[in-house]
Image (tube, rainbow, N blue to C red):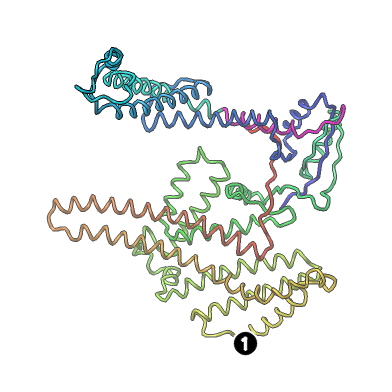
Amino acid sequence: MIVKMQHLDLLCVASDKSKTLERLRELGVVHLDLSSACGVEVSSAKGAAADAERAVRAILKARGKSKVERLVRTPVSDVLALQSAMEAKAATVEELDRVIAEYEPYGDFDPALAQKLLDEGIDLKSVAELPEVLPPKRLSALKRDRSDVILSMAEDEARLSECDEKAILDSYPDLADRIAFAAAKELMTQEGSVAYISGWVPAPKVEALRAEVNASGWGALIRDPAAGEVPPTLVEPPSVFRPMKALFDGLGIAPAYTEADVSVPFMCYFSLFFAMLVGDGAYGLIFLIGTLAARKVLSRSWFVLLTTFSVSTVVWGLLSNTWFGANIPWCANWPTVKWLADPSYHNMMLLCFTIGVSHLMLARIWNGVCRLPDSTAIAEFGWAGVLLFMYLVTNSIVGIFSGIPTWAFYVFGASLVAVFGFSVKPSELKTRGAELGMLPLNIMSALGDIISYVRLFAVGLASVKVAENFNAMATGLVAGADAVWLKAIMSVAMVAILVVGHGLNLAMAALSILVHAVRLNTLEFSNHKGVSWAGYAFRPFKKIV
């Protein structure tokens, strides 16, 4: 569900601004909009964070892939000073290179002696070619200077590579807290001896906040959101589906405050989409092993999500008998394997369209149930009937069904009456009447929405075919070799092709999940459910560590 929010106006004595904000941060229940703060303290805190980031990048660049025996805890200012010195020396080397290139054609002569002879009136140009402007030093001296600067740069780089970036990385949470606190302090408006700030509080946390208000002697006005106000969105799915919050945060999306929490269907269908798009049980095992290996560095939510998605893929591999693009002989006669292996691909497309219509009809029926007893609920149930009819049309178009049954036309007719008759109330015709003109286009687009789910079959099939081709390419090398030594060489090449080929295919499968699995949930399903993902997530003002 989406947690109800309450608007907060908090007042305190102006002299206690910092103390009040510190206590508010300890509570960690109030969302403050800190994005507009740009004062001196905020800029200073952001500058310190940027310096820390630059310092870490400089250390890692200097170290490259080499291992360092000892690490030295170094202040950020010293790291940046080393980097600045290296940049200045690099500029010096560049300038020396330019001067050396300019004067190298004239040889290694002493410019001081040449200038002395010229000053005494001796015409040196008659015996030697000289530049119009003499160099500052002998060519050999310039080259020694260049070597000295390069040596000094190498020493600086070695010192920089020994700096301990972990100590700087550990300071990131403190820097983020400093930025947030400075922003909150700036946004806390002061009027005479009183200071105040506004924010949002989840309704279940209001009583705890009231208790603190009374204990601290603050003033507080807590009310429902007013018209035009846009509260942050706090999604609280059922405990089993709570890890979906991590995926929403990772994607940077949140439903609007007035919309629905779709975490449960999102996770269920996303797991199915993940499995079908990857399309290979062996790849699922690789994902699962990687997830288990990274358990200590993954948050609990991400560990649960990745484990669920990986296991779903392994199960799909069992149902379709697909492992690294090959089949296990003893699974070939399983009913699901034989059904999915239909050479016409009709069964796979039927499965995709069925998944699609169930996904979209769920959205419409859900809308209808939520709107009862309002008359617009009838229109939502009508949309479910339209989707069912378009599902039958889609299967007929591609030849899966021989035709559309007669009863479906009666359902479609009744659904059209429901959609056109109850989408807009009579009292809203003046303001929303134009929406009725768009309904024919929306009804036709429902056909395209169902067809779009065929991507689950197309992308999954492409992944399997790519794997099969790499397998054929690799095994063909060994099969074509006659000599023993040639077979050995070809065996090594075969392993390399299999590793590179399946690695590339695995990467492409991961990319397809981001593109297609996310789209089907956040676009097709969400359009029918009425979720715009235009909200912003609830971020309580609290310490990161």
Please state which of residues 303 and 141 is positioned toward the viewer in this rendering.
141
The magenta span reads 171-193
Callout 1: few (<14), some (14-19), or many (20+) C-alpha neighbours within 10 Å? few
Give the residue at x 81% y 44%.
7
Q: Main secondary structure of the magenta part?
A: helix
Q: Is residue 521 left or right of residue 224?
A: left
Nearer to me, 444 or 144: 144
Q: Is residue 504 left or right of residue 239?
A: left
**Residue 185: within the magenta?**
yes
Answer with left or right where residue 514 lies relative to residue 132. right
In percent of width and height, residue 533 lies at: 66, 55
**Residue 502: x %, y % from top left:** 36, 54
Seen at 60% across and 62% down, the residue is: 523
The residue positioned farthest toward the bottom in the image shown: 406
Image quarter where the C terminus lies is: top right
The answer to whether residue 416 is above or below residue 21 is: below
* Numbered disc 1: secondary structure: helix
292 over 469 or under it: above or below: above
Q: Amino acid at mark 1?
A: Thr
**Front in this rendered view, residue 512 or 92:** 92
Circle 1 sits on which residue?
Answer: 406
Task: Place residue 420 in its image quadrant.
Answer: bottom right
Residue at point 57%, 27% (across, down): 171
175 part of magenta stretch: yes
Quarter where residue 182 is shown: top right
The residue positioned farthest toward the left in the image shown? 483
Q: Is residue 538 above or below residue 161?
A: below
**Picture quadrant of residue 205:** top right
In this view, the residue farthest toward the front is: 121
Q: Position of residue 278 (x, y in %)?
A: 45, 58
